[in-house]
Amino acid sequence: MKIELMKENDIQACSVILQKAYEQAPYNEVFELGVAEGHIKSKYGSENKNSFVALDDENEILGFIIVSEDVWVGGKQAVIEEFAVDSIVQHQGVGRSLMEHTRNHLKENGFVSMVLWATKDKRLVDFYTQQGFSVSENSVVMFGKL
Ligand SMILES: CC(C)(COP(=O)(O)OP(=O)(O)OC[C@H]1O[C@@H](n2cnc3c(N)ncnc32)[C@H](O)[C@@H]1OP(=O)(O)O)[C@@H](O)C(=O)NCCC(=O)NCCS
């Protein structure tokens, strides 16, 4: 497996991965492909220097992580906008490798922190905890129904 910068050409394959990944528990969401693609396009933006894809030996995309840049107290903060691994190859370390690669890249590029929003699912929270994340003591995510 190799990890490379995500390119605009990768958006379609990542959209299929996103669609399949969120069909599973705990989400059970059915996205149309066009909706998934619109979501990925908007998160990726026009050019992204901090987003990565994991590829197999045949250059098929196994998973991806989209990261945007923000500035917060203390300096540059990375926002994990989207992160998914093809449901067929989950539990094989692809997500962990993508996250570790991204973390090293961000450190080398002067970022001081990362932030993300995750569903309250124990396995997911355990995964992020293993990756060095912790629940914020200062912030809470608020939701307003419209
Ligand atoms: C979360 C995700 C990216 C992890 O990728 P992965 O390649 O399966 O991760 P790894 O193989 O490196 O590590 C797997 C570990 O993550 C944890 N995990 C947490 N939530 C999980 C989930 N929904 N599915 C699989 N593993 C999950 C488990 O501890 C698992 O360990 P195990 O394989 O021993 O059970 C992947 O499961 C995925 O795409 N999930 C759906 C989309 C999603 O939740 N994205 C994150 C949004 S915040």
Image: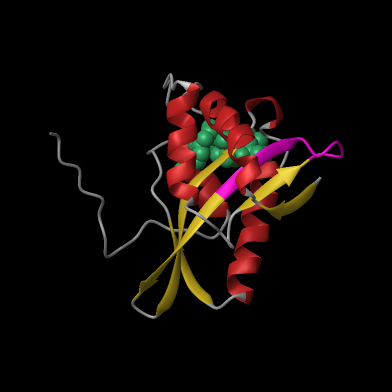
| Residue 103 visible in the shown view | yes
Residue 100 coordinates in the image, percent (x, y): 65, 58
Question: Residue at coordinates 42% horizontally, 26% vertically from top-left?
Answer: 27
Residue 18 coordinates in the image, percent (x, y): 54, 32
- 20 in relation to 125, above or below: above
**Any magenta on residue 58?**
yes
Magenta range is: 56-65
Quadrant of the rendered image containing residue 106: bottom right
- 83 in relation to 140, above or below: above
| Quadrant the N terminus occupies | top right
Question: Residue at coordinates 50% horizontally, 50% vertically from top-left?
Answer: 44
| Residue 26 visible in the shown view | no
Pick the front one: 4 or 107:
4
Pick the front one: 50 or 72:
50
Q: As drawn, is 69 to the left or to the right of 60?
A: left
Q: As drawn, is 60 to the left or to the right of 136?
A: right
Pick the front one: 120 or 32:
32
Residue 9 coordinates in the image, percent (x, y): 65, 42
